[in-house]
Amino acid sequence: MEFDVNTLRSLSTLVSFLTFVGIIVWAFSRKNSTEFDTAANLPFEQD
């Protein structure tokens, strides 16, 4: 396999896409929902 600029571009696109999908899966996972709900309500808590 010859590594040229197009191969490097393809690999960087693939890595970026997989990172994006990983972030989406992490953000919408059910086990993080309570933590995110708590963080979302922080501005509304009274002192």
Image (cartoon, grey):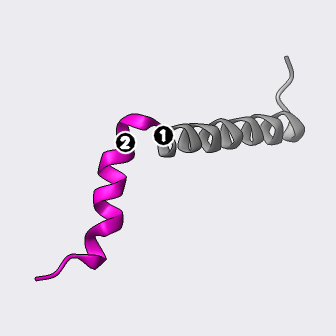
**Residue at the outermost bottom position:** 47
Please state which amino acid type lies under the numbered disc 1.
Trp
Q: Would you identify the image quadrant in which residue 25 lies?
A: top right
Most foreground residue, 22 or 1 = 22
Q: Would you identify the image quadrant in which residue 10 lies?
A: top right
| In this view, the mark in front (2 or 1) | 2
Residue with the mark numbered 2:
32
From the viewer's perspective, is 19 left or right of 35?
right
From the viewer's perspective, is 43 left or right of 11?
left
Q: Residue at x 82, y 28 (%)?
A: 3
Predominant SS of the magenta segment? helix
Q: Is residue 34 magenta?
A: yes
Q: Would you identify the image quadrant in which residue 13 lies?
A: top right
Please state which amino acid type lies under the numbered disc 2.
Asn
From the viewer's perspective, is 33 left or right of 9?
left
Q: Secondary structure at mark 2?
A: helix
State the image coordinates of residue 34 (x, y, percent, origin top left).
31, 47
Q: Residue at x 31, y 62 (%)?
A: 39
Contact, mark 2 vs mark 1 (Cβ under 8 Å): yes
Q: Give the alpha-carbon distance from disc 2 to disc 1, as whole Å.
A: 8 Å
Q: Residue at x 60, y 40 (%)?
A: 19
Q: Earlier in the sequence, mark 2 or mark 1?
A: 1
Q: Residues within 10 Å of mark 2 (few under 14, many from 20)?
A: few
Most foreground residue, 6 or 32 = 32
Residue with the mark numbered 1:
26
Q: Which residues are magenta?
A: 29-47
State the image coordinates of residue 44 (x, y, percent, origin top left).
28, 78
State the image coordinates of residue 33 (x, y, percent, origin top left).
38, 45
Quadrant showing the C terminus: bottom left
